[in-house]
Amino acid sequence: MCSFSRSTFRLQATDLFLSSLNSRCALETPPRFSFNRAVPTKVIAVANQKGGVGKTTTAVNLAACLAALGQRVLLFDLDPQANATSGIGLDKIEGASAYRVLLGEGSLLDKIKSTAYERLEAVPSEVDMCAVDLELARMENHLHGVANALKPVVDSGRFDVILLDCPPSLGILSLNAFVASDGLLVTLQCEYYALEGISMMTRVLGQLGAAGANPRLEIFGVVMTMFDGRTKLCNEVVGEVRNLLGAKVFETVIPRSTKLAEAPSFGKPIIHYDKYSSGSAAYELLAQEVLARLNS
Ligand code: ATP
Ligand code: MG
């Protein structure tokens, strides 16, 4: 049984149950959030140069939960590993990625694929994206490939939110994602080195701003992932991150959950794989927080 205090962590069993019921109501009745069509598309990069910290899990599940809340969502897989592509139930198909578009050939609008889920579409990735970093590096405007590719999609007004799933590096592809974004959603795994990720990202953000590449870019939010309330370390890390980053850190903490780890092998976001799991409740809550932040 978890023994930490309510003020430091929301996902105690009772809270989780009640919250889960609340968010379930939000999904099963008409969405309470009515989108104002005049609000421009928001582009959010899910990022952390550290590997395996829950970027893709968050991008896929947040995308699905935002779509379930009535948002028109595009999930853009920028990682050659293509985990978001398979996690959302799409195949990795040769020629289907944004590779050529990022190099200036064709339109990203033609690369958008529908998914099995209403209001959720995706630009898949595949192994050819490995070469994009090198190819972009040779181009004159090498930081603007993703921004240029996204422009017609943003201008089309077809989506409310575009989530970019970034690779685990601060290479050219990630920097391109940052230049194209309104904000960064940083995932931090509840572990000892969690804060290292954020300090490097903050530095890069400052450098991009100073270079005039994207001065408006800011950290949209920080989400703590793979929380295990039974360990003292997890509780300490969450406390430390909250002390340092304050309101940037989302109230919702994503628990470590077997169901969340299993869902990608079925090509399903957690709300469509196990609607009543703790992981599903957590991502539903996170989506509500994200939406509130986007609309504020
Ligand atoms: P990469 O840097 O390689 O792109 P990532 O940051 O995108 O990794 P994920 O792929 O989302 O991280 O997660 C890494 C692994 O941890 C995956 O096997 C995933 O299923 C698992 N995982 C992610 N979040 C959770 C969670 N909350 N509970 C249990 N397993 C999780
Ligand atoms: Mg990933």
Image (cartoon, rainbow, N blue to C red):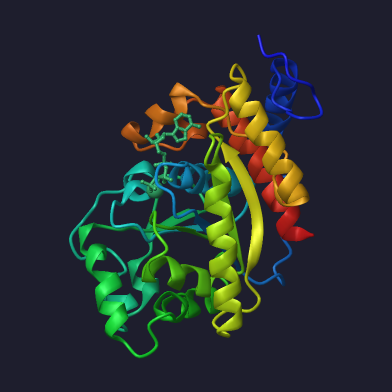
Q: Quadrant of residue 149?
A: bottom left
Is there any visible trace of residue 216 in the rendered image?
A: yes
In this picture, residue 50 sits left or right of residue 188: left
Question: Which image quarter is the C terminus in?
Answer: bottom right
* Ligand 1 in which quarter: top left
What residue do we see at 30% from left, 58% from top?
Answer: 125
The residue located at (55%, 29%) in the rendering is 279
**Which image quarter: residue 134?**
bottom left
Is residue 137 left or right of 270 when viewed as pictured?
left
Can I make out residue 73 in this image? no
Can you say which quadrant of the picture contains the N terminus? top right
Up-down: is 81 above or below 231? below
Residue 22 point in image, percent of width and height: 74, 29
In the rendered image of this protein, does residue 25 appear above or below residue 287?
above
Query: Residue 256: horizontal and vertical position, in percent?
Result: 52, 26
In the image, taking residue 145 as reference, residue 218 lies left or right, namely right
Q: Nearer the viewer, residue 22 or 78?
A: 78
Q: Whole-percent x and y of residue 178? A: 51, 69
* Residue pictured at 32% horizontal, 84% vertical: 104
Q: Residue furthest top?
A: 1
- Image vertical order of residue 54 relative to residue 278, above or below: below
Q: Is residue 269 left or right of residue 195?
A: left
Tell me where residue 173 appears, x and y as whole percent: 38, 68
**Between 181 and 87, which is closer to the camera in this rendering?**
181
